[in-house]
Amino acid sequence: MATKPKIAVFASGNGSNFQAIADAIQAGKLDAELVLAITDRPAAFVVERARRLGIESFSFVPSQYDSKQLYEEMLKEKLFEHGVEWLVLAGYMRLIGPVLLDAFENRIINIHPSVLPAFPGKDAIGQTLAAGAEKAGVTVHYVDAGMDTGSIIAQQSFPIAGRKREAVEAEIHKIEHELYPATLQRLFKHSFI
Ligand code: GRF
């Protein structure tokens, strides 16, 4: 049996996508080993989720480092120590810098709650609604140096049709929790899409 890719999930908040990925692995739907949860917010709920699942987590406080380069060097060491091969961003609210981009070239993936290239950046759902868009959706993409600009791997959209923000958010999360593990599985099986 081929060895399973080792992944680290980066999250800054609730971590429901981290949970969905861990659940998919547990259910045998995603052949990967989730070896580390990384957060830049030590109080984030993702830390508690990791604890409950018995997955190691690592928290750091970016302001305690003199530069992004320094904390990314520290993260790189940590990731290498754990043999991590893929970085899976799930609600990680920071741009990835050159240190990690170089160390994990074409092996950093993100999920974003809009149909990119429309509405990159913060509060994509709010942006979508404020623009009066007909559709909302989700994109899984490779990470490059830009803000949600990397090559698109998978997308799914649905009509907003007068729905309130809560309903749109709920639909987006529902899609994310299916689409992210399924897309990672395809990616890991084929190395490209
Ligand atoms: C998701 O909507 C994801 O698309 C975006 O941030 C949110 C994270 O949610 N990048 P959660 O922390 O996984 O619950």
Image (cartoon, grey):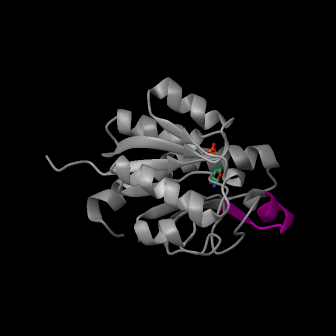
Towards the viewer: 175 or 55: 55
- Above or below 52: residue 36: below
Residue at 79% in and 50% down: 163
Which stretch did the figure color magenta?
126-136
Picture mark count: 0
Residue at left 73%, top 50%? Answer: 168
The answer to whether residue 183 is visible is no
The single residue placed furthest to the right in the displayed view is 130
Q: How far across and down, in percent of the image, does residue 27 sit?
A: 36, 34
Between 78 and 4, which is closer to the camera in this rendering?
78
Q: Quadrant of residue 162?
A: bottom right
Pick the front one: 16 or 44? 44
Kindly give the residue lying farthest to the top in the view shown.
52
In this view, 136 is above or below 152: above
Residue 73 location, x and y as percent?
A: 50, 60
**Lateral position of residue 126 relative to residue 147, left or right:** right
Is residue 179 shown left or right of residue 28?
Answer: right
Q: Is 107 placed left or right of 38 in the picture?
A: left
Which residue appears farthest toward the left when viewing the image?
A: 1
Examine the rendering and report whether any part of residue 180 can be seen. Answer: yes
Q: Is residue 129 magenta?
A: yes
66 lies above or below 50 = below
Q: Position of residue 139 (x, y in %)?
A: 57, 63
Q: Quadrant of the C terminus?
A: bottom left
**Residue 80, image quadrant:** bottom left
Percent x, y for residue 79?
42, 52
